[in-house]
Amino acid sequence: MLVLLGALIVLASTLGGFMLAGGKPLVLLHVSEFVVILGVAAGVLIIASPAHILKEILHKMKAAISGRAPGREEYFDLLKLLYELFMTGRRNGLIALEEHVLDPPKSAIFLKYPSLTNHPERLQFLCNSLKPVIDGKIKPDQLEALMAAELRAKQEEAEHPVHLLQLVGDSLPGIGIVAAVLGIINTMSAIADGPEVVGQRVAAALTGTLLGIFFAYGFVNPLANRIKFNDSADQLCLRCIMQAVAGFAKGLAPLTAVEIARRSLDSSAALSADELEAGVKALGTAK
């Protein structure tokens, strides 16, 4: 919701200042300029993006506008889930984890934490990280390197939508100039119609330049930056999983492995060691 609030402030401040200076908002409403600017911007995005990245851009924009990003409770649930899995593996043997990892939707442990099961990327990363631990085919040090490589690949993939939105944002002022030039060409062909008509068409042309800059710096680039912050939060969840699973694979106690993961979180999680310990003890499985 903060994104919508920010967009409202940008719009209200711009129109409000224009009206205070004596301007009339309807003067800015030139449909032809909107068609050129928004149409060309959409075309640039389509030209520059593979189909799957276009879908990802739409998904990330929706998530940014709705404000969906990992919060304190999601991090806490993730740590408790990891602890329960590790305790199950320690008490009943690693083979006991197989039924949970191979079929998470039917796992009694995973079903307790929908914040993870409803996020396919995190769930897949966790299960893929635990499978080599169960199989015992990879040494702990090799497992950590494997997870780190996968995490880097996911980070690079997550950057593509941001870069493409920034490309559109950087292109919009130039697209606005194109719209303005088209308006001036249109104006030149109407000089014989008199000063009033010429004035209206010059105003429409200048509106094109305004809209290009306004959309770029008021909406598109800030939205790209918000998506970047959301991606960082998602990557933090994956890094938390990596730290915990790597520690558990090296033989650390479940609580110690989870504590290492907690320390990899930033201040947005705001979890203390005492809170974590109290949380896992409340599960009735702490040892």
Image (cartoon, rainbow, N blue to C red):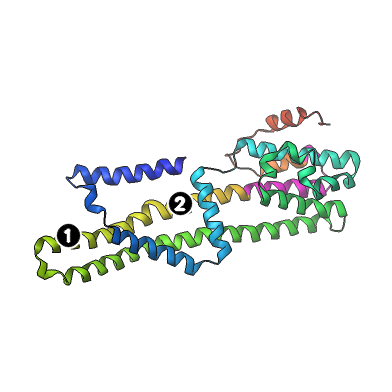
How would you rate the neighbour count of disc 2 (Cα within 10 Å): few for under 14, some for 14-19, many for 20 or more? many
Q: In percent of the image, x 90 and y 40: which residue is there?
A: 92
Bounds of the magenta span?
236-256
Secondary structure at numbered mark 1: helix
How would you rate the neighbour count of disc 1 (Cα within 10 Å): few for under 14, some for 14-19, many for 20 or more? few
Residue 248 appears left or right of 91: left
Residue 7 highlighted magenta (yes or no)? no
Residue where numbered disc 2 is placed: 223
Residue 146 appears left or right of 266: right
Question: Is residue 22 at all visible to an observer of this figure?
Answer: yes
Residue where numbered disc 1 is placed: 200
Q: Residue furthest front?
A: 193
Q: In percent of the image, x 44 and y 63: which residue is there?
A: 167
- Main SS type for the magenta part? helix
Mark positioned earlier in the residue sequence (1 or 2): 1
Secondary structure at numbered mark 2: helix
Separation (CA) of disc 1 from disc 2: 33 Å
The amino acid sitting under disc 1 is Gln
Relative to residue 227, is residue 180 depicted above or below? below
The amino acid sitting under disc 2 is Leu
- Between circles 1 and 2, the one closer to the viewer is 1
